[in-house]
Structure formats: C-alpha cells, structure tokens
Amino acid sequence: MSEGKASPSAVEAETVTKIFGSGETQVTALNEVSVAIRQNEFFTLLGPSGCGKTTLLRLIAGFDHPTGGTILLEGQDISYLPPYKRPVNTVFQNYALFPHMTVGENIGFGLEMLGQGKAERDRAVGEMLQLVRMDELKDRKTDQISGGQQQRVALARALAPHPKVLLLDEPLSALDLKLRKEMQIELKRLQHETGITFIFVTHDQEEALTMSDRIAVMNAGRILQIGSPREIYDHPAERFVANFIGETNFLEAEVVSTKNGSARLRLPSGKMVAAALAEGARTEGKVSIVVRPEHAGLTSAKAKAALTGRLENVVYFGTDTHYHLRLEGGGEPFIVRQQNSRDTEEKLEPGSEVGIEIGKNAVQVLRD
Amino acid sequence: MSELAASSRISVDDAPQDAASALQAAERQQAKRRWLLLTPALVILLLAASGPLLIVLTYSFLKPGDYGGVIWQFSTEAWFNVFLQEDIFEETVTFSDAHLSIFWRSVRLSLGTTLMALLIGFPTAYFMATRPASSRDLWLFLITIPFWTNLLIRTFAIMEVIRNEGIINSILIGLGIIDTPIQMMFTDFAIMLGMLYVYLPLMVLPIYASMEKLDFRLVEAGYDLYATRWRVLKRVIFPLVKPGVIAGSILVFIPSLGAYVTPRVLGGGKNLMLGNLIELQFGQGRNWPLGAALSITLLAIVMIALLAYVRNVSRQENTHG
Amino acid sequence: MAEAGTSSQTRFSIKRQPGFTTIAIVCFLMLYAPIITLVTYSFNAGTSVAIWEGFSWRWYEAAWQNEQVQDAAARSLIVAAFAALIATTAATMAALATTRTKPYRGLTTVYALINQPLMVPEIVTAVALLIFFAVIKVNTGYQGLGYLILAHTAFCIPFAYLPIRARLEGMDLSLESAAADLYATPWLTFRRVTLPLLLPGILAGAMLAFVISLDDVVITEFVKTPGQDTLPTYMLGQLRRVVTPEVNAISTVLLTISVVLVSVFFFLNRRKR
C-alpha cells in the first residue's frame, strides 16, 4: 500500500468478504473490505449496528474466519489462524471477565496460557493493576466490583500479554455518560503509554471523533471513507458519511470548472462558490454538495448572500442557536447554527426573509 | 468454543489457500467432533431404550412359547387377542370383555386422576404464584420434594392412610362414627387416590411455571374493565396459563395410563390396569407376544396424546405470534 | 391472605380467588401428611402401624441386621453410583454437542432419543428390556449387574442432561472467546473456563440421576435376575397386606437420602440464578 515499505501495517485487510449462513438466509456482513491500519495508531471502525464493524473486529481477533480475502498482521497472513495463536487481544463489549476467578487471576490468565512463571506473572499483574489504577482490588471476585472497575480489569487483562494490536468492541457502551467521558481520556492515555495499536469499534460518532487518529466509516458491509476525524467531518465523501457524522445541509449544484481537487460551482440561486471535490466525485454537471450548519451564517445583506430563504423556526440550545430556513426554490430545510454570546440579541423572527453566507472552504462535493 | 476447537486443527501451513474449502474443512471437523461427543449417550440410549422397542414390536408378531418366550413364527394372533377372543368350541369371535374392561378402567382412572389433579393443582399453583417472590422458592421446593421421592414409598404411605387398620379408619372408629372399617383398599378409588397422590406435583409444576410468568397488571386491567373475580379467572387468567394446564394434564395422564406399581399395591391384584395386564403376560400368563402387543398399544395411545399436545402447543405459538 | 373477614371486605386484593388458599393448604397437607405418618411410625416401638407405643430404633436395627436388606442396599448404591457416573458423563458430552450450535441435521432425532425415557411409559421400556436382555442372557450366559446398570444409565441420561444443558445455555459465549483470545488452546479453554462454570450443572445432573436410579422400581423389577433385588424391589416383594415397620424404616432412610440430595440440587441451582 502507500505506506513505507520499511514498517508494514499493523493490520491489513485485503478485499475481505464475510458471508454468514447459506441459501436464502445468507447475509453478507463484509463486502470486499480493504483497510490498512498503521503501527501505534488509534484506529476506529465507526458505523451503525449491523454495518459489519464488529464482524471485521472478530475476523482480526480470529473468532471468525473470512469467506474471502486475507487478513495480514504485520505482513503475515493470519486469516485462518485460531485466536489463541494471534498476538492480538480483545476487550469485549460485556467485558467477559471470568466469574470464577479473581481480578488478579483474570489479568494473569493470558500470561499463564503463554507459559509464564508465577513470579513473573505476579509482577506483570501488579504492573497492569497500577497502569489501570486498581492496585487494591487484586483479590476481589469480578462480580464484587463496579462496572467501571470491570472495564479497567478487562483492559488490563487484554494489555497484560502486550499484544501487537488491542481490539476494543464498543467497550464503553455499558457505562454511564460521566464514566464514559473519563474512560475515553483513560483509553487515550493507555494507548499513548503502551504504544500499542488500538482498533476501536463504536457506533458513537462523538466518541470516534474525540479519540481516534483515524476513522473508517462503515455501512452495509463496506468501508465508505477512511481519514482523520477532521477529514471525515469537514470533507465527507459520501452522503451516508455526511449524514452519520454531525448535522449537514444537502444542496444541488452545477460544476463550472475544476482544478486540483477543488471546483467552482453554481448554486441554484445562481451564485458561484468554491468547493472541495471528494475523491471520485463528478467533475461536470449536477452534483450533490454539503455545508455544515456551523459553516454557514445569516446576513441581512441579501443581495450579496450565497443563498436566500425564509426563516421558519428558531431553536435555542444554550451554547448556540439553530435557525431552520426554507430556501428560495424549495428543497429540504436548511439549518444554520450560530454560536451564542452575551451580546447576540438579534431579534430574528420566524417568517422573515434572510440571506445565508457560506464560509470559505465550507462546501464539499459528494461522490454520488 | 466449538468453532475454536474446529479451527485449531488448521494451522497456517496446511490451510488450503481458498477460503471456501478452508471453511468447509472447519465445518466438517466441527461436525465430526459433535458426533463423537454424542456417541456414548446415543449408544446407551439405542441399546437400552430405543432399540429394545423394535424388539417388542417384532415379538408382537410371533407365537408364544409354552413356558414364556416365543416361537419364531409369524403370527397376528397376539394382536387379534388384544381386543378380541375366540371361542374354540362355538367358533365365534367376540370382544374380549376382560381386556376391554381393563383398557376402559385404565383410561377412566387416568382421566379421573387428571381431572382431580387439575382441580387441586390449579388453585395450588395459583396460591404459590401469588406468594411474595421471596417465599415462592420455598413453596416450589415443597412441591418438588415429593416428586423426587420414591414412588413406591409414597404409595406405601397412602396405603397406611386408607387401609382397614389405617389412620382414617382408626380415627373414624375411635370417634365412634363407624363400627366396621370402610373398605377403601383394593378399589378403583384407592388406585385413583394413589395416582393422584403420586402424580399431583406433575400437575402443579407446569401450571406454576406459566402462572409465575403471568403479568398481574392484566388481572388489574380485567377488574378495571368491570370483570368479576370469576370472570377474571375464566377470561383472563385461565387462557393465559392454558399451556401450563395442558402440559400438566399430559404429564399426569401419561404415567397414570401406564401405571404399574400403584395399581399393584393399592388395587391388590383384582383391579388391574394396563400395566399390570402387560406384566401378567410375562409372568403367569406366559404369553410374551400378547404382552408385546399390549405394550405397543399402550405406547401408541401415549404417542397420540403427546402428538396432540405438540400440535396444540405449536398452534398456540402460531396464533400468539 | 385472609379467606374471609373484615380486611378482605374493606380492601380489595386483586390476587385473591375465593377458596384457592384453602385448596392449596389441603393440597400441601395431603402431600406431606402420609409421608410424615410413615416416617413417624418407623420409630414406633410396637408392631402396629396405627397405634403408637413409644419411640424406638428397633425397626432400624432389624433392617440393619437383615442380610437381605444389606445386600439390596449395597446393590442399590452400586447401581445408582455407576448409572449416575456414566449417565452424567454421557449427558455432559451430549449437552456440549447439542447446545450453542446452529441446528444441524439429526439434531431433532438426537433430542427425541435423549428425551425418550421421559416419554415412553416405564412399563413398556421395562418389558422391552426384559425381552432384549433375555436374548442376551441366553446367548452369553452373563447374569451380572451390568444389565441393571445399563438400563438405569439409559433412563438417567435425560435427568442428568437437563440441568447441564440449562447451565450451558445460560453461559456467556464470550467467556470462551475471551479465553481463546488470551492464548488458551481449545482444551485449556474447556478445562479452565467451560468446565469450572459448568460444574454446578454437572453436579446437579449427577445428583438427580443418582436419586432417580435409587428410586426406580418398575424397570428394575423386570430387568433383575432372580436374587438381584435392589431396596425398592425388595420392599415391593415384602409387601403382603401390610407394610411392615421394617419396610417403613428402610423407606425413611431412602426418603432422607432423596430429600437431602434434592435439597442440595435445589440450592445449587437457586444460588446461581
């Protein structure tokens, strides 16, 4: 792939297909998915339930095997290797802590299976407990500790054998909001301190944006886009990605000219704007474009504005205010989000005609 | 677990490169492992449960030996004798009154037992299910204990109560209500009471299982909509626990029909049921083929009852979603 | 719950049904009174089973010294122990092969086979085994306890199978995945995770199997070679018109064993719920 040949990707999937069942009940969970995950990266698989993200994780862990394609770990084919022969560990969604063992025994289990001696193991368990800040709970049974603590034990258990890759299957979904925020920071810290590649599965877009180095957005068994949180948010390549992450306004426009991945477009209002082109987007004719609500603004100077419309609804959110507009020429409602400050006390009444400004680099042309 | 075990055998080296055959190999491995695990149980069951039934079927079409056993000659005589009898002197064929009356007694007593068990078991299950959750387990325990204790011993226990020198008669005579003991032993009543006593838990347990799942907000809704207690019972509670009632009835009816120990102990050799009639053919009667044919007949009745139950259950499931 | 009285007139209880509590109490009395009577009279000093003549261990001593009873008791225990052991082992293996798997060809037949002893009337199985074993006895000359053990094992299998299966189905699949993920081979996964978690179910199954074997009358009566009495068939043979106090004493001992084992089973299961 495009990475340097010197260090192979931590994990690489090459046109991986996974089909469950057969005949009429056959389900294609993954459809020729290819992705390369770098060393020491915090990589997130993001998508709605049933999009195939957990299936991909299970294929990397070895709980399932691909129907087609290969999975490489540091360049080696591990597609059909059983899970206990892969230097990869998993943090399960429900933690899957062994109920008949203590916290310490749980954490030491992997090392024990790898044949490490007791003294060495005890030291490693101690270190791990320290790493996740749980020193005093070593001899507790796993059902005698709280959900947050169970989460930490699950992490320590998976990290103890120093895997090449750590897989996390929606590990935060069972925690309440406050604990979840804490654990998000904790996970970033652990990844930084251990230097292990993390592959994180979630359906929570905010979690993905705040924690990841890179995100792969998945839907219906395919990866739609891979990129840094910023790229994904600011330059969604497809309608699904734009819709799944944050709020978006969709518009139609016509390409006038293109140059080096950017384009000049004519809006339905007749005004011209500059836009970024998604990879594989059309370079002529009608295209779909997106504008994030916070990248647009309201103006009273209607003549200069990119778009004009009638204000239908004003919704106050504390930190910001959402203006719902009906554009001239119809179509879907257009939303503009403006930060509130102490001084903003403009009295914009529903029903008034207003102009919409679109910020620089705010327009993205979609692939479809 | 099963997938893991299967895939463990595939090391990277010998794994076929194309995915389809690799998965097929894993599946074959898994299937092989499954059947290996099943082998001991299946061998034992085929040897000492299912297989012998086929032998019984075969024996029912053979001729009886003079001192038990069979002569290996095809004959439908045994089946003929299940319901009919032939008078050798008058050369007439009539229904076998002795056998028919035993069949009829078995069915009648089993149905009676089932009905009595239902009349007592339903309120008992209801009572248990309406206890506070904390004490429900205790009641369940109390109903389970007799079920797991020796059937023979329980039959002895009921015998102690009803025989002529037993507790009931002793008390009644002691109180001067009667002068001579009431003959309860060796009657159909004794057999039915005995079967009721030993099989009652089998009625209570399934009804209780349905009743425990009953959402009492539905009962509240019934009362809210002006139903009386009787109508709530009839229109709300009973339909909802009906699967338990049917299961309980089947569970009581089937062993009653095939009962052997209880009629032997409490019926005293005069009031035979099917089980005893079958035994007779292998003992004094020395007519193994007839015994085999009677066994198959009993089995057939039981299977019909079970099939009716299964069909009923699946129909319920269909109508409920 | 008051059957009648002021409280039920003033306060409406939605759970009350008239007469149900009375019937339930009668039901429990009816279940326990005969057993309690039987147990009580096993301690009677007199010969009568109806007139109390004082407390005594007399009948227990008589039973204890009776060589036939000793024989039968030993035979019962041997048969029950072997049957429970073999049935539980086979049932555990069968449960592992029939749970947590996609339906496969033959699964329904396997279920039917395992549950067959629960569905077929005991007398029919007894007759079938009588015929079958008679053939084997004639051909091999073997007369030993093997027949009883094999017959008991077969009808114990479903009783051992049910609690083990229930336990397996309640078990979290991801625990075994986690073990495999942490470098445990399939065998180690089974030994360190599956088996320890399954153990309460296996113990429960073994106990039920033991009790069921210990209590069996009908099949034993038909399968045994003459002189091979177990305690229940010995007791059935002793029965004339009256239950002797000695049989009462044996019954009480058997009852105690069953009640203790079933109680242990019950609490094993409850704690895990």
Image: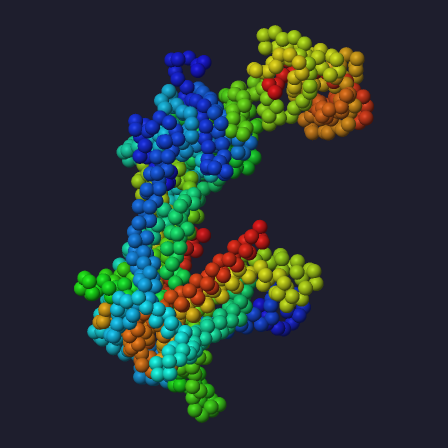
Q: In which quarter of the image is residue C60?
A: bottom left
**Does residue B321 appear anywhere in the picture?**
yes
| Residue C176 percent coordinates (x, y) | 38, 40
Return the residue found at the far left. C141
Give the vertical position of A44 relative to A303 (above or below).
Answer: below
> Relative to residue A27, is residue A114 drawn left or right?
left
Q: Is residue C216 positioned above or below C161 on the image? A: below
Q: Residue at x 54, y 73 (%)?
A: C22
Figure quadrant of residue A106:
top left
Q: Is residue B205 above or below residue A24?
A: below
Of the 4 image quadrants, the one containing the N terminus of chain B is top left
Front-lying residue, A63 or B81:
B81
Q: Where is residue B300 in the image (x, y as percent from the top left)?
A: 42, 64
Residue visible at 44% across and 26% down?
Answer: A16
**Total count of labels:** 0
The residue that appears at 37% across and 60% down in the rendered structure is C117
